[in-house]
Amino acid sequence: MLNWIKFLFLFLLALGFTITFIVFYQAGKPFAASEKVVKEAVLANNVLEKVEKMDHYHGKTSWITVYGTDKNDLEKIIFVEEETTKILKAISIKDGITKQKAKDIVKKEENVKKILNAALGMENDTPFWEVSYLDDEDFLHYAYLNFVDGKWLKRISKL
């Protein structure tokens, strides 16, 4: 009887791990597929020569932000609409503030316990850094900083 209990416990544990793995694998598939399509579109249109990384941003519309270098070895950021793979804007990394600078601006002006993420987004043809963070009371906040000059665009507080 004890062997059956051990077997059943191990079987259920293995089944739980397998189901968890399958769920997480399936959840990541749409992101991988859209990233592949966007990468091919950016390279096919000769916007970039080399793609280094991609980030997703979900605002009013969903974007994939593509980081890479062009044929002149200039570091560029390309904003691509996720659904249509339409290339909406290309900007040079040197024309704006860095991710770290955006985080530092938020830390300096707000009561920040922990920075959760900083991602590039774009609305109304204006690129911006979206910085999410927790305050001392563990409330979630979002800060939106203009990519070019680091000025505050808007804040969403205490979620």
Image (cartoon, rainbow, N blue to C red):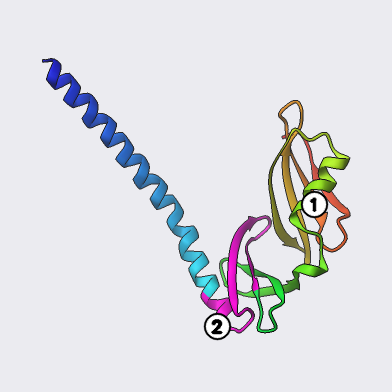
- In the image, which disc is placed on residue 55? none
Q: Position of residue 71 (x, y in %)?
A: 66, 84
Q: CA distance from mark 2 to mark 1?
A: 32 Å
Residue picked out by circle 1: 102
Quarter residue 64 falls in: bottom right
Q: Position of residue 81 (x, y in %)?
A: 62, 68
Examine the structure image and report whether residue 30 is included in the region drawn in magenta: no
Residue picked out by circle 2: 44
| Type of the residue with mark 1 | Ala
Q: Position of residue 31 (x, y in %)?
A: 50, 59
Image quarter hosting the N terminus: top left
Q: N-terminal of the two: label 2 or label 1?
A: 2
**What's drawn in magenta, residue-wise?**
40-68
Q: Is residue 12 left or right of residue 77?
A: left
SS assignment at label 2 = helix
Of the pair 145 and 60, the residue shown nearer to us = 145
Residue drawn at x 68%, y 57% as measured from the top left = 60
Label 2: how many Cα within 10 Å (few below 14, some 14–19, many 20+): few
Residue drawn at x 58%, y 71% as measured from the top left = 51
> Would you say the residues marked 2 and 1 are in contact, meaning their CB atoms lie under 8 Å apart?
no
Residue drawn at x 74%, y 48% as measured from the top left = 131
Examine the structure image and report whether residue 52 is included in the region drawn in magenta: yes
| Type of the residue with mark 2 | Ala
Label 1: how many Cα within 10 Å (few below 14, some 14–19, many 20+): many
Query: Can you say whether 1 is above or below 39 in the image?
Result: above
Q: Is residue 85 left or right of residue 110?
A: left
Of the pair 60 and 7, the residue shown nearer to us = 7
Residue at the extreme left of the image, as rendered: 1
Frontmost of labels 2 and 1 is 1
